[in-house]
Amino acid sequence: HSYVLFRADDGVTVLPPGSIASKVLFHQAYKAAFIASQLTAVFSSKMSFVQLANLLTDPQQGGYLFSDDYFWIPSATPAYDPAHFFLPVSFADAFGQVTSIQYDAKYHLFTERITDPLGHAIVVREFNYRVLQPWLLEDINGNLSAARFDAFGVPVMTFVLGKPGTDAGDEIDMSSTE
């Protein structure tokens, strides 16, 4: 079992189950994890159903939603930027932890930086606008990776460059994206 909730065209208002608006803005998906009778059969000798339900629905410990005799796993919920065609700018998980997304300043088309709740970021250093893909990336440890593409936009070479300023990785001509 699963179900999805959507938002109204303002990007903020959550619509009731079974409703959808013209922009089809996703709010949150739910997937059934456990049925109450299943958990009662397994855990009744260890704790009461009320204790178990309190533990599972606690936003800091379980994060489940209890409804219709099921415990539901909620997906992350996006925050939209209405000024840029409702692109998602962040996602909050069931525990309230937020992952943020930044887009390229030139066209607001590509994801330029993704920052997790701990502040670790994956950064696209440079884009290849001909193939509409990033070609130089920096991971959370500061290591660079790169790719070269053929005429059809298919990666034909990849490089692991290591940290800038060290001589530990592959070599690549950085003067061109091609």
Image (tube, rainbow, N blue to C red):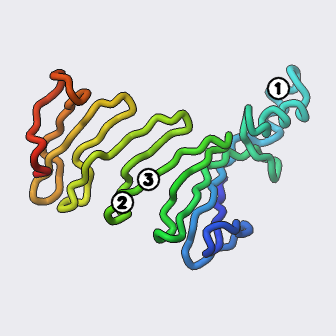
Q: Nearer the viewer, mark 3 or mark 2?
A: 2
Indicate the secondary structure of the residue bearing disc 2: loop
Residue drawn at x 20%, y 23% as measured from the top left:
166
Q: Which residue is mark 2?
A: 105
In the figure, 79 relative to 159: above or below? below
**Looking at this view, is 64 or 88 the one in front?**
88
Q: Nearer the viewer, mark 3 or mark 1?
A: 3
Q: What is the spatial separation of the Cα atoms under label 3 and label 2, in whole angstroms?
A: 9 Å
Q: What is the spatial separation of the Cα atoms under label 3 and label 1, in whole angstroms?
A: 44 Å
Residue contact at pointers 3 and 1, CB within 8 angstroms: no
Mark 1: amino acid = Phe
**Looking at this view, is 115 or 4 the one in front?**
115
Mark 2: amino acid = Ala
Mark 3 / mark 1, whichever is N-terminal: 1
Q: Which residue is mark 1?
A: 43
Residue drawn at x 10%, y 51% as measured from the top left:
178
Q: Residues within 10 Å of mark 3 (few under 14, many from 20)?
A: some
The image shows residue 46 at horizontal and vertical percentages of 86, 20
Mark 3: amino acid = Gln
In the figure, 19 relative to 88: above or below? below
Q: Which residue is mark 3?
A: 102
Identify the residue at the far bottom of this view: 22
Q: What is the spatial separation of the Cα atoms under label 2 and label 1, in whole angstroms?
A: 53 Å
